[in-house]
C-alpha cells in the first residue's frame, strides 16, 4: 500500500501564528523525507483555510497579510463536520454555495501543528472527531487540559505530580475590585510572584512582579490577552528542564536545558536565535528548534530518570497522544522538581530531543502517523448507537 497523504495544518487564529508556520514547514520537510505526500493547509490569522501544494513556501508568510490571489492550485477550503463528507471541500464562497470535493485536495490523515488557541486547545480536534478523520496528536480532552495552565495543575495534583500552587483570577473580578484581588494575592504569596494568562504560550504575557505596582501592570497585561490569569510563586534560583513524550506506547525523549538570556525564558530566546536554513524556504528563525539549549541536560542520571518518569506520568494523567513536551522547573538548592506545563503541540514537534535518542525527524513523523491511524481504527470499533427505541410509538 502506498503511503497515506498527510494534510498539515498550520498558522491559525492565535498569537503563536508565526511559530506554527515554522513548525508546519519543518513538518512538511520531514514528511517529504519520510516519503509521505503532504497537502499544506494554511489557516490565516482571520481563520480562513487555504489548501494546495503551493503553500509549502515560507516566502508566502513573510508579510503581515497573506495574499492567496495568483497562487496556482490553491483553494479556499473547509472541513465539514458532517461525517458523510469526510473530506476537504472547496469553500462554498468560492463555488456559489455548492459543496465541492476536489481530488487534488484529498487527505488520508490530518496533522495539525497549530499552536495555541483554536488549534492546540481541543477545538480543531473536535472538528476532526465530528468529521471522523484520523488526526495526529492529542484528542479534545488532553488538548483542552494542556492549554489551560490551571486545569493542568489540578490534574497533576490529583496524580501526585509536584507543581506550583496558584491563584486564578478572572477579568470580571479584577475590573470590579483590583485592590481586593491584590490583597488576595498578597495574603497567599510573598513577592516576587509570577503572573500568566491561563491559556496562552510562547511566554506571551508572562511576567515576574516584585511589588504591587508591577503586579497591577502584569495582571492588566495578562487579562488583556486572556479572560483569566494565574498568579503563582516566582522562583528566583532555578533551571528549566524539558522532556518530550511520544505514544502510546509512552516513551520519553532526551532532556534539554534551555538557556535563558533573562530571568524568564522569553519569546526571543525561544524563537529569534540560532536561525538556520529550512528546506525549500529560508527562515530567519528555526522556531523552537533554534532555542539555545543543552541536550542532554547536564543534570545527572537520577534527576534525568525522575524527569522522564514524571513526564510519562503527566502524559498519561491528561490522556495525551502523539508527541508532547513536558516542561519542568528545578530548584537545585531545595532539590525541588516542579512540573510547569504540558505542551500538546510542541514547537518544532520537539524533533531535536528525539534526534538525541536516535529517532530522526522523518521517523518521528512516521511514528506519529502510525499512532493516529491506530487510534482512529480503535475509535471506529466503538459502538456509538444504541437501539433503545425510546421514540418508537
Ligand atoms: N513560577 C515561575 N518562576 C519563575 N519563572 C517562571 C515561572 N513560571 C514560568 N517562568 C518562566 O517563564 C517562562 C514562560 O512561562 P510558561 O509557564 O512556560 O508559559 P508559556 O506557556 O508561555 O511557555 C518559563 O519558561 C520560565 O522561564
Ligand atoms: Mg513554557
Image (spheres, rainbow, N blue to C red):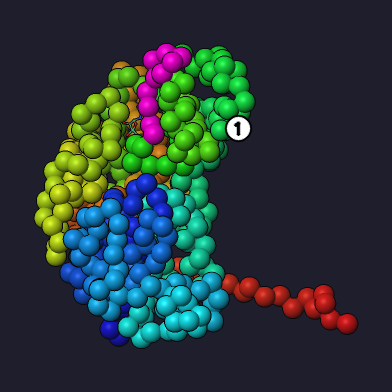
Q: Position of residue 191 (x, y in %)?
A: 43, 14
Nearer to me, 319 or 79 = 79
Which of the 4 image quarters holds residue 89?
Answer: bottom left
Q: Which residue is mark 1?
A: 172
Q: Is residue 48 magenta?
A: no
Vertical placement of residue 89 versus 137, above or below: below
Mark 1 CB near ligand 1 (8 Å cut): no
Total labels: the figure holds 1
Q: Secondary structure at mark 1?
A: helix
Quadrant showing the N terminus: bottom left
Vertical placement of residue 11 versus 226, above or below: below
Q: Residue at x 13, y 43 (%)?
A: 274
Q: Position of residue 186 (x, y in %)?
A: 52, 14
Which of the 4 image quarters holds residue 327?
Answer: top left
Nearer to me, 206 or 383 = 206
Q: Residue at x 30, y 40 (%)?
A: 242
In the displayed structure image, the side of residue 68 where residue 157 appears, left or right: right
Quadrant showing the C terminus: bottom right
Q: In the image, which residues are magenta?
A: 205-214
Vertical placement of residue 61 versus 286, above or below: below
Q: Position of residue 116 (x, y in %)?
A: 40, 49
Amino acid at each position: 500500500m502506498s503511503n497515506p497523504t498527510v494534510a498539515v495544518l498550520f498558522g491559525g487564529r492565535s498569537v503563536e501564528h508565526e511559530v506554527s508556520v515554522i513548525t508546519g514547514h519543518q513538518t512538511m520537510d520531514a514528511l517529504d523525507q519520510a516519503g509521505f505526500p503532504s497537502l499544506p493547509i494554511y489557516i490565516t490569522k482571520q481563520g480562513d483555510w487555504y489548501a494546495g501544494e503551493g503553500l509549502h513556501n515560507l516566502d508566502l508568510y513573510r508579510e503581515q497579510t497573506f495574499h492567496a490571489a495568483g497562487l496556482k492550485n490553491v483553494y479556499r477550503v473547509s472541513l465539514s463536520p458532517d461525517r458523510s463528507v469526510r473530506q476537504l471541500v472547496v469553500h462554498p464562497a468560492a463555488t456559489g454555495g455548492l459543496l465541492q470535493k476536489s481530488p487534488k485536495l484529498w487527505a488520508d490523515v490530518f496533522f495539525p501543528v497549530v499552536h495555541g488557541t483554536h488549534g492546540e486547545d481541543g477545538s480543531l480536534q473536535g472538528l476532526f472527531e465530528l468529521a471522523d478523520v484520523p488526526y495526529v496528536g492529542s484528542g479534545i480532552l488532553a488538548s483542552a487540559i494542556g492549554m489551560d495552565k490551571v486545569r493542568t495543575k489540578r490534574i497533576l495534583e490529583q496524580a501526585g505530580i509536584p507543581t506550583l500552587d496558584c491563584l486564578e483570577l478572572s477579568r470580571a473580578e479584577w475590573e470590579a475590585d483590583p485592590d481586593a484581588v491584590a490583597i488576595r494575592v498578597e495574603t497567599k504569596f510573598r513577592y516576587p510572584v509570577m503572573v500568566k494568562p491561563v491559556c496562552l504560550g510562547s511566554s506571551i504575557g508572562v511576567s515576574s512582579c516584585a511589588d504591587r505596582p508591577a503586579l497591577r501592570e502584569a495582571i492588566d497585561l495578562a487579562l488583556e490577552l486572556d479572560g483569566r490569569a494565574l498568579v503563582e510563586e516566582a522562583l528566583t534560583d532555578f533551571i528549566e528542564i524539558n522532556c518530550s513524550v511520544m505514544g502510546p506506547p509512552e516513551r520519553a525523549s532526551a532532556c534539554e536545558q534551555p538557556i535563558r538570556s533573562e530571568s524568564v525564558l522569553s519569546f526571543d530566546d525561544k524563537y529569534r536565535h540560532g536561525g538556520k536554513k529550512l528546506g525549500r524556504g529560508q527562515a530567519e528563525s528555526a522556531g523552537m528548534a533554534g532555542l539555545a539549549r543543552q541536550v542532554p541536560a547536564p543534570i545527572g542520571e537520577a534527576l534525568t530518570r525522575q524527569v522522564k518518569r514524571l513526564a510519562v506520568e503527566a502524559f498519561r494523567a491528561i490522556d495525551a497522544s502523539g508527541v508532547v513536551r513536558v516542561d519542568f522547573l528545578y530548584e537545585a538548592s531545595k532539590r525541588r522538581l516542579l512540573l510547569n506545563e504540558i505542551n500538546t503541540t510542541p514547537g518544532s514537534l520537539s524533533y531535536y530531543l528525539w534526534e538525541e535518542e536516535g529517532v530522526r525527524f522523518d521517523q518521528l513523523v512516521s511514528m506519529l502517523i502510525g499512532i493516529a491511524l491506530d487510534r482512529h481504527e480503535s475509535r471506529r470499533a466503538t459502538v456509538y448507537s444504541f437501539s433503545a427505541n425510546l421514540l418508537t410509538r
